[in-house]
Image (spheres, grey):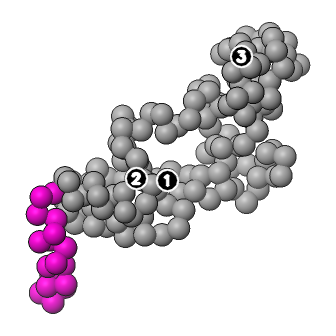
Amino acid sequence: MLGLPVTGNTKEYEETQDMKAGKNIPLGVEITTENKCGFCTNSKCCTYITEELVTPRSMHDFDHMLWQLSHRNIQAYKDEDGWYLLINNACTHLESDGRCGIYDDRPMICREYTNDYCEFDEDSEDGFDLFFEDYAALLKYVKRRFKTWSRYATTRDEHLNES
């Protein structure tokens, strides 16, 4: 049924625009929620997971986030819904052609995922209010946010000795 109009969310794509974006969509094909995944070339939705964070407020909270971002493939962002860890690690069931290797037995969270508006339509990063690529980026933000960060950082070991 590729290319045939169906009911639901639809969007027509111009071939020239989408070729630049890495989308291989024939001219005049109508993209729907039913056929969109078939045109996705990078399976972005299956290459990461996010974990919602309690909104960090204190220096201690941000110190903990710095520890989290000290690990490989971990980033953090804030959007209109809150703060999140972004764990860049592809699903082990993602096939080389971008399809799910356990589609019929996939977990509930995968079944509930909707592609109504996804990374195919727009990079998720476009909706971030704040994005921290790594430890250094978050540390720079923390130092701007907390004028007394340097004093806090130098006294961390003292807090351990008090316990």
Residue 84 in picture, x, y percent from top left: 41, 50
Decide if residue 122 is on the left or right side of residue 1. Answer: left
Q: Which residue is mark 1?
A: 86
The residue tagged with tag 2: helix, strand or loop?
A: strand
Residue drawn at the location 71% of the way across and 16% of the way down: 13
Residue drawn at the location 83% of the way across and 52% of the way down: 96
Residue 136 in picture, x, y percent from top left: 37, 63
- Quarter occupied by the C terminus: bottom left
On residue 128, the disc is: none
The residue tagged with tag 3: helix, strand or loop?
A: loop
Amino acid bearing label 3:
Tyr
Decide if residue 151 is on the left or right side of residue 106. Answer: left
Earlier residue among tags 1 and 3: 3
Q: Which residues are magenta?
A: 146-163
Packing grade of label 2 (10 A; few <14, some 14-19, many >=20) is some
In which quadrant of the rendered view does residue 8 lie? Answer: top right
Does 62 appear in magenta? no
The answer to whether residue 156 is above or below residue 75 is: below
Does 152 appear in magenta? yes
Q: Nearer the viewer, mark 2 or mark 1?
A: 2
Residue drawn at the location 49% of the way across and 61% of the way down: 74
Amino acid bearing label 2:
Phe
Q: Which residue is mark 3?
A: 13
In which quadrant of the rendered view does residue 31 lie? Answer: top right
How much space separates mark 3 and mark 2, taking CA atoms? 32 Å
How much space separates mark 1 and mark 3, taking CA atoms? 29 Å
How much space separates mark 2 and mark 1, taking CA atoms? 10 Å
Residue nearest the viewer, comparing 9 with 76: 76
- Quarter occupied by the N terminus: top right
The answer to whether residue 102 is above or below residue 11 is: below
On residue 132, the disc is: 2
Amino acid bearing label 1:
Leu
